[in-house]
Amino acid sequence: MFVIAGIHAMNLERIDLNLLVYLDVLLREQSVTRAAEQLGITQPAMSNGLKRLRELFNDPLLIRASHGMTPTERAIELAPRIRQALSQVTDILEPRQEFRPLASKRVFRIMSSDYAEATLVPALVKALRSEAPDVVLDFLTPSDVSVQDIEQGKVDLAINRFNEIPQSFHQVTLWTDSFSCLLNRHNPAAMRFNLKTYLESQHIWVSKTGMGIGFGISPDRGGLGQIDAALGRIGQKRRITIYTRHYQMPALVAHKADLIATLPSRIARLQADHPQLVIKEPPFFIPEFELKMAWGPLLHHSPAHRWLRQLISYVARQITEQEATAEAERLSRRRTRLRDRE
């Protein structure tokens, strides 16, 4: 009978095998936080996994000590056997042939927001043309996709801002972004841009986070998002006259009317090429947000899927590094101009 340190085959039907993966990482890292980060899950999800493992093995497994967490005698006994069992399972499930991007014609379905499509996707497509010219990307909008589509592997990835992600999903942060205000340079508020003029203006609301079909906005019910939550914390409220889920719309409207669009900074910079538009820093504090890539457990170990995730992460790092370099050069040129004036 197949046994893993006291777990009999007759009991396998009640075991979530993901727990063995959790245990393997926990015993290596001896830290709930580091183990959660390595697996791309939340710390509460990892803590819940440890609780279930303790019940499963009827042992504390890891005990908190002054220098971190220390494995019990049972855990030390389990570690090599768990690692061997996972290696055998992986060997059974992994395809024998490695994924070959240059020869692949696979279709990847990716849910992405307007924000991700404008800021990340162009560089991703460029990288893909050289890495895997025959691979096909099928981009879906957040409203096209449900959580179940990703859980069942019908959709490979979701790239968006998420208020919450199912605990079973894996996730990584691609980058963080701030907010900027986009407005007509002839807008009276542009001459003296402060909280007073900001609140006196009319605004465009734009957002689409998460997944699933969206519904119309009901301003009285709240839930308008990060910008309005930040205003609420200082006891203020802006006057919104246009609601949209498309990041491309504000630039079309902002240069025709006395409106302000408060947008992610990367989007604002992309849309500020119009000579009538200017970018201003918000006159109040808005926390930064994270662009995340999330995927379900079903495809987590797929070589093709792993390759795509690594490529997207690489492209995101390149974008942020290029932006940092450009910003450093801009500041250097500014310092040079100031010195020349002195």
Image (cartoon, grey):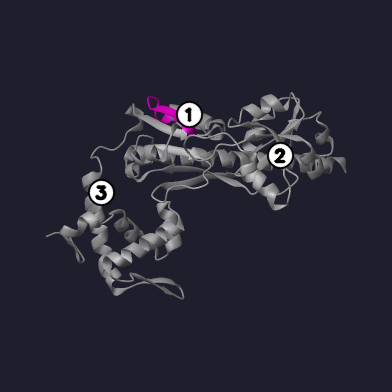
Identify the secondary structure beneath mark 1. Answer: helix
Give the distance between the C-alpha atoms of the residues marked 3 and 1, in whole angstroms. Answer: 31 Å
**Residue hosting label 3:** 90
Above or below for 103 versus 72: above
Amino acid carrying label 2: it is Arg
Above or below for 137 versus 175: above
Q: Earlier in the sequence, mark 3 or mark 1?
A: 3
Q: Earlier in the sequence, mark 3 or mark 2?
A: 3
- Which circle marks residue 50 in the picture? none
- How crowded is the residue under tag 3: few (<14 C-alpha within 10 Å), some, or many (20+)? few
Question: In the image, what residue occupies the spot 51% across and 31% down?
Answer: 121
Is residue 27 visible in the rendered image? The answer is no
Give the distance between the C-alpha atoms of the residues marked 3 and 2, in whole angstroms. Answer: 49 Å
Q: Earlier in the sequence, mark 1 or mark 2?
A: 1
Q: Percent position (x, y) of residue 207?
A: 59, 37
**Residue hosting label 2:** 330
Magenta region: which residues? Answer: 130-143
In front of the other: 70 or 227: 227
Whether pointer 3 and pointer 1 mark residues with C-beta atoms closer than 8 Å, the reply is no
Q: Percent position (x, y) of residue 338?
A: 82, 42
Amino acid carrying label 1: it is Val
Q: Quadrant of residue 267?
A: top right
